[in-house]
Image: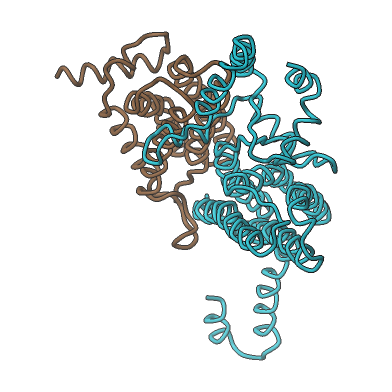
Amino acid sequence: MATSDELKFHEFDEAADLLAVNPDATTTSISERQSHVAVNVSAGYEEGELGEETDQTELLSGQKKQPSFWTFEYYQTFFDVDTYQVLDRIKGSLLPLPGKNFVRHHLRNNPDLYGPFWICATLAFTLAVSSNVSHALEKRGDPSFHYSPQFHKVTIAGLVTYCYAWLVPLALWGYLQWRKGLSLHVGSYSFLETVCVYGYSLFVYIPTSILWLIPAAWLQWLLLAFAAALSGAVLVLAFWPLLRSDSKLATLATLAAIVSLHVLLAVGCKLYFFQTLPSTIPPLHPLVTAQQPPVLLPHPANTSAPLRQ
Amino acid sequence: MRDLKAVGKKFVHVMYPKKSSALLRDWDLWGPLVLCVSLALMLQGGSADSKEDGGPQFAEVFVIIWFGAVVITLNSKLLGGTISFFQSLCVLGYCVLPLTVAMLVCRLVLLASSGTVSFIVRLVVVMAMFGWSTLASTAFLADSQPPNRKALVVYPIFLFYFVISWMILTFTPQ
């Protein structure tokens, strides 16, 4: 009874520490379920020590029973989140504080697929839409410009976002499992937790891609640096405790790889979807230089007519 | 004839969304099919600088609408919704009706002129119809969701109709 009281008052600090020590324990969410757990545990304790074990084992087996892979309920376990939990996780991805590991503090052994999936979908459409709008705003002064929706950008943005958010965690998870096999001190997260961290860390790029509409190149690069730093920090803080006890070289190499892939994604998106201002100036030069030779060459009109085509 | 009447009745229900169970109880997918095909046809003939630089192709519109509706339905079921798969598809499909009307209006406006004024008119019309679609589908679907997950279910619907509205707004004829 004393331990459950302690967990109630100091939930955010001690539970995270307890989870770090014993990663297989599950904590329940604050709402409905905890009241059920409290009632069952107290009933178990009241019945005396003989009944206590059977009640607890029943309770534990009820919590741990996993539906089979082929049932719908199995996939429902990945969407077992409420609105406030998703919002809390998004806030956690925007504010990486040094003490708070995203996986232990925010996910708490309840990773979800809702966040990663819909954040990637939103990011893909936001990139494509603001890329199209910024392209139209840039070329607004050019009389030969004819607006086109550039719908293929949606496909490309979607492919890039989903591939990054699923293949990179897969590779990282595989690498960590391999390192765990080599040296027992390296911890690991489940595949879903890795996907979850990566998915939520991409959230900061959504407002960034909207702000990239402002056509000042220095501001765009500043925003990119800021966003990459924020989401890179979330990732580093999440994976640092796992790698801390590994050899220095391997730790540094892994963290460097995580950060550089993340920055590469941001820079690649910026350059492909939002061309910087200087690139719009060169197209004017070929028109200017093409018009000059007919003036310099002392030829009659019939040679300049093909050039004007 | 009876099916046509049922489809027509559902169209009326979408335009004046009241808490009625006719849409949910007797679902059918004829209405969504007709709306999807007409929207995809009206989105054809857009301008393109190069072969791939244009608006969405017919197949792309079709895939986005149907695949999007399926994904949203799966999402709401995975979050614990009590609505059946085809009922949800039916509601999402029928609520594309205001946006189809917006597409029709946009094409008529573009026949008249294609300057800034027409853009503002089209923007207002599309935004109004987008709001109408989202509100209509939310009115029908929100009740079947667990209470503390309503926003998680409504957001993908918002995104879905936003994408369709974007396709309608950015349509430019040749």
Residue B152's x, y, as percent? 56, 27
Residue located farthest toward the front when viewing the structure as drawn: A50
Q: Residue at x 40, y 41 (%)?
A: A69
Residue A30's x, y, as percent? 67, 20
Q: Is residue A166 left or right of residue B104?
A: right
Residue A48's x, y, as percent? 62, 12
Residue A309's x, y, as percent? 52, 75
Q: Residue at x 81, y 24 (%)?
A: A10
Rendered position, A221 above or below A121:
below
Along the line of sight, the residue nearer the viewer: A285 or A159: A159
- In the image, the chain rendered in brown is B
Along the line of sight, the residue nearer the viewer: A91 or A214: A91
Rendered position, B172 above or below A225:
above
Rendered position, A209 above or below A108:
below
Residue B130 visible in the current orientation: yes
Q: Is residue A289 left or right of residue B50?
A: right
- In the image, the chain rendered in cyan is A
Along the line of sight, the residue nearer the viewer: A6 or A204: A6
Q: Is residue A121 left or right of residue A67?
A: right
Q: Quadrant of residue A308?
A: bottom right
